[in-house]
Image (cartoon, coloured by chain):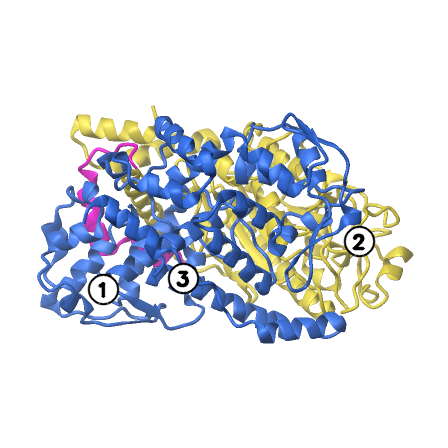
């Protein structure tokens, strides 16, 4: 029996109409069973130039392919052969503390170079041919979640990644505004009227159920979130604002398993250097503030942060001092329980590119997802990540 | 008027096609200039293209709102979410929409063949990269899986063989179809049990000779126009009619004349698409969003950017339209557009919404003049599908002012269904 039906029949049978108290009772049992581990995702939209992010600064092939665009000065040297872009100073501390794993050459077979198709592939954990209507986080929610607030996207609309079959996450830019909208007296009246009716499988009841879920999720977030502002200083940019809001939720111990964020502008076809440097700085500084905030709140140990982009960029620069759409690129995993901090693997050979002149993938992104589902959340990944992908050994 | 006459009228109204006609001469000039000197800055072109896409989108919305060719507009929305395509070249996108619109009520065979030769589609599903020595299967696969037969009605070998038949398809800058003989594979192909030196059109003919194709299309039409819950018996009935000649207008004429089309079980069961919600409001109380970018923004918030479909499978529709965010926006939208606070009553005097993000033009007296004798009850029958409207305790919700009553009705979950 579905839980919703259970609540309805039980509440009707006992004459109780206080649905929220039932929901609460379930929550408590559930929390104990599953723990509080959470995943934070940062999506770099537009295709981040991985090669100018993690730089093979000893490699002539790199400098030859990018006569004007290659980074030559102030590289943060991390390894004998790889360094960080000068804008990534803030990530250096994470690296030294063993709190970041950099996975090189992450991609998938037959890479697609259209932004939205490739983004679809990453968000659905699909392949070049599949057309999933649900995202990998959505399918994860299908297995473990009871409420939309268990996955929150910072933004005004919900990405495919968070859409499931049975349940989807929710998006919110401003949880107080969401709460106010959901408390509109007229909507209150409509919702109240509906609680007295039996809900069936009809689409109308689906709408009412969603409305009630939206209201209870908005209420839950509003009431559970600690209103005291964080004492950590965040930079002024859109990603920092999103992460600050999420840190507030996390440090208030919301029972939310996934937080989704994005920073766009990485589609650097022309005049790349200045823009890319600014974006990387925004990313690194925001991330550093976020990690500080979580550490202060004592929630960092149970948080894992994944950063990805829909593709990397071409190895050779173009005529407009930029780069075109590429294929495999790097993925960052940040947390305190990493099995292999630092570099997970070597950068692929720059003299063995694919037919478009792009880096060949050596790690399938779905094996990263598998590791997160299986070894971080301890959930069976077979229905969440399609295909047979051996999970990377990311966690200790 | 009898039902048959109404249906005939509906089809007659849509005999003509008003094409999309966003003026793209500047855009083409700029694109031509840049193609001759590739080092030129693309900024101006991208800006102009963005602007033109906005215009194209708004022209599409206006067409659906005004509804001069009602059935054709409806079929265009249907086909655009069937033959899903997306292109960054606004000129080719307008050509594509016009192709769908012109053929929307014509012959399905011609429609498929025309779509297979459209520049936007040749780019979207890699038809241009499909060459004799290096075939690309993308279009051939989607043609069968999504456009004609449905999954499981063909083999991987059929995909490979039909891809060979479509090799050599290309287009020129103006968007005309170009067949490149030297890239076309003239050899024998074995496809769905038949053998021959087939070309793309032959493949379409062989696909359409399968009854499964007629059934597949009729199922989609049924889910869209009748009920997302498929009635197999009705599909068989429709497929028998459609299979004879693949005449789309004929199919729709037959469908609209069925008794079962009008049965209660098919009323109030379909979740409106975002565009249907916006158009539904327009028809009850006309409005115009004053900011040129507003339609695109609202589409995006509600999850249906007409010119930016999620993937080649299109919007799944039905319950997939609804999540906690989109539903709350749907419920909030009427009060924002007509700038009325839902909880106001005449007694307290009506006030607008503070910091309303949506600026709309509308005639504030429209409701009073247009529905002079209406009671809340009859207004409700107009706004809400009657099958589900009976259960609303109207007096409990509606208050005294007619405009407010109308906006409140449009803010009920019931309004999301048709």
Q: Is residue A65 in sight in this rendering?
A: yes
Residue B132 picture location, percent across and down: 78, 42
Q: Residue placed farthest to the right in the image?
A: A60
Q: Decide if residue A161 is on the left or right side of residue A112.
A: left
Tell me the residue that label 2 is attached to.
A78
Tell me the residue that label 1 is attached to.
B341
In the foreground, B360 or B22? B22
Is there one chain holding both mark 2 and mark 1? Answer: no
Q: What's the residue at 47%, 48% (across, down)?
A: B79
Which label's residue is closer to the chain start, 3 or 1? 3
- Subunit ID for the residue under disc 3: B
CA–CA distance between discs 3 and 2?
A: 54 Å
- Subunit ID for the residue under disc 1: B
Residue A21 picture location, percent across and down: 27, 36
Residue B159 picture location, percent across and down: 66, 34
Q: What's the residue at 70%, 39% (across, down)?
A: B165
What's the magenta region? A173-202
SS state under label 1? loop
Q: Colour of chain A?
A: yellow
């Amino acid at each position: 029996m579905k839980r919703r039906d259970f609540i309805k029949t039980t509440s009707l049978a006992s004459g109780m109409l206080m649905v929220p108290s039932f929901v609460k009772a379930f929550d408590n049992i559930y929390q104990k069973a599953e723990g509080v581990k959470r995943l934070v995702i940062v999506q770099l939209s537009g295709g981040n130039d991985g090669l100018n992010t993690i730089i093979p600064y000893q490699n002539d092939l790199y400098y030859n392919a990018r006569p004007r665009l290659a980074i030559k000065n102030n590289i943060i040297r991390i390894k004998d052969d790889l360094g960080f872009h000068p804008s990534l100073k803030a990530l250096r501390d994470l690296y030294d503390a063993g709190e970041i794993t950099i996975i090189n050459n992450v991609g998938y077979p037959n890479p697609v170079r259209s932004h939205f198709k490739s983004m679809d592939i990453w968000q659905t954990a699909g392949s070049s041919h599949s057309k999933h209507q649900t995202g990998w986080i959505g399918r994860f929610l299908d297995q473990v979640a009871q409420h939309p607030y268990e996955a929150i996207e910072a933004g005004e609309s919900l990405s495919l990644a968070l859409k499931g079959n049975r349940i989807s996450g929710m998006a919110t830019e401003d949880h107080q505004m969401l709460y106010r909208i959901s408390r509109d007296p007229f909507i209150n009246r409509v919702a109240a009227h509906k609680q007295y009716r039996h809900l069936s499988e009809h689409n109308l009841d689906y709408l009412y159920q969603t409305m009630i879920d939206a209201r209870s999720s908005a209420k839950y977030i509003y009431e559970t979130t600690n209103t005291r502002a964080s004492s950590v200083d965040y930079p002024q940019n859109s990603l920092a604002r999103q992460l600050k809001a999420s840190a507030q939720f996390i440090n208030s111990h919301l029972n939310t398993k996934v937080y989704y964020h994005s920073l766009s502008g990485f589609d650097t076809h022309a005049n790349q250097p200045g823009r890319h440097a600014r974006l990387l700085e925004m990313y690194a500084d925001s991330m550093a503030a976020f990690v500080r905030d979580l550490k202060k709140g004592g929630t960092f140990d149970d948080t894992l942060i994944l950063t990805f982009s829909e593709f990397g960029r071409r190895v050779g620069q173009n005529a407009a001092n930029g780069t075109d759409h590429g294929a495999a690129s790097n993925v960052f995993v940040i947390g305190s329980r990493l099995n292999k901090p630092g570099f997970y693997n070597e950068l692929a050979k720059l003299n063995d590119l694919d037919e478009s002149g792009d880096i060949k993938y050596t790690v399938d992104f779905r094996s990263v997802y598998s590791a997160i589902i299986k070894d971080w959340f301890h959930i069976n990944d077979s229905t969440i990540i399609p295909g047979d992908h051996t999970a990377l050994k990311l966690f200790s | 008027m009898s039902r048959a006459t109404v249906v005939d009228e509906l089809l007659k109204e849509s005999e003509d096609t008003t094409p999309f006609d966003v003026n793209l001469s500047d855009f083409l000039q700029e694109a031509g200039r840049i193609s001759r000197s590739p080092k030129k800055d693309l900024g101006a072109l991208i800006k102009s293209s963005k602007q033109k896409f906005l215009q194209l989108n708004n022209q599409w919305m206006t067409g659906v709102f005004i509804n001069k060719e009602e059935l054709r507009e409806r079929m265009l929305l249907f086909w655009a979410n069937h033959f899903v395509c997306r292109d960054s070249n606004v000129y080719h996108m307008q050509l594509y929409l016009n192709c769908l619109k012109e053929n929307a009520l014509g012959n399905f065979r011609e429609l498929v063949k025309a779509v297979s030769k459209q520049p936007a589609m040749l780019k979207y599903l890699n038809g241009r990269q499909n060459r004799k020595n290096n075939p690309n299967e993308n279009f051939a696969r989607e043609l069968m899986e999504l456009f004609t037969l449905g999954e499981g009605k063909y083999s991987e070998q059929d995909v490979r063989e039909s891809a060979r038949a479509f090799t050599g398809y290309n287009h020129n800058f103006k968007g005309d179809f170009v067949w490149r003989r030297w890239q076309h594979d003239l050899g024998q192909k074995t496809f769905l049990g038949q053998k021959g030196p087939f070309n793309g059109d032959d493949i379409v003919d062989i696909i359409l000779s399968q009854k499964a194709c007629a059934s597949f299309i009729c199922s989609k039409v049924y889910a869209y126009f009748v009920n997302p819950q498929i009635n197999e018996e009705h599909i068989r009935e429709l497929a028998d009619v459609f299979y004879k000649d693949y005449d789309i207008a004929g199919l729709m004429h037959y469908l609209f004349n069925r008794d079962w089309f009008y049965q209660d079980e098919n009323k109030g069961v379909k979740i409106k698409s975002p565009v249907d919600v916006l158009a539904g409001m327009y028809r009850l109380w006309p409005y115009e969003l004053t900011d040129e970018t507003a339609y695109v923004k609202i589409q995006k918030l509600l999850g249906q950017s007409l010119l930016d479909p999620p993937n080649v499978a299109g919007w799944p529709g039905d319950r997939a339209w609804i999540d906690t965010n989109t539903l709350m926006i749907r419920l909030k939208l009427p009060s924002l557009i007509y700038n009325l606070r839902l909880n106001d009553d005449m007694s307290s005097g009506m006030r607008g919404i503070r910091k309303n993000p949506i600026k709309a033009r509308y005639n504030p007296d429209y409701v009073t003049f247009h529905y002079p004798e209406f009671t809340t009850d009859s207004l409700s029958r107009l706004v809400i599908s009657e099958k589900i409207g009976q259960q609303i305790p109207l007096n409990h919700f509606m208050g005294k002012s007619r405009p407010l009553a109308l906006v409140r009705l449009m803010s009920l979950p019931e309004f999301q269904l048709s």
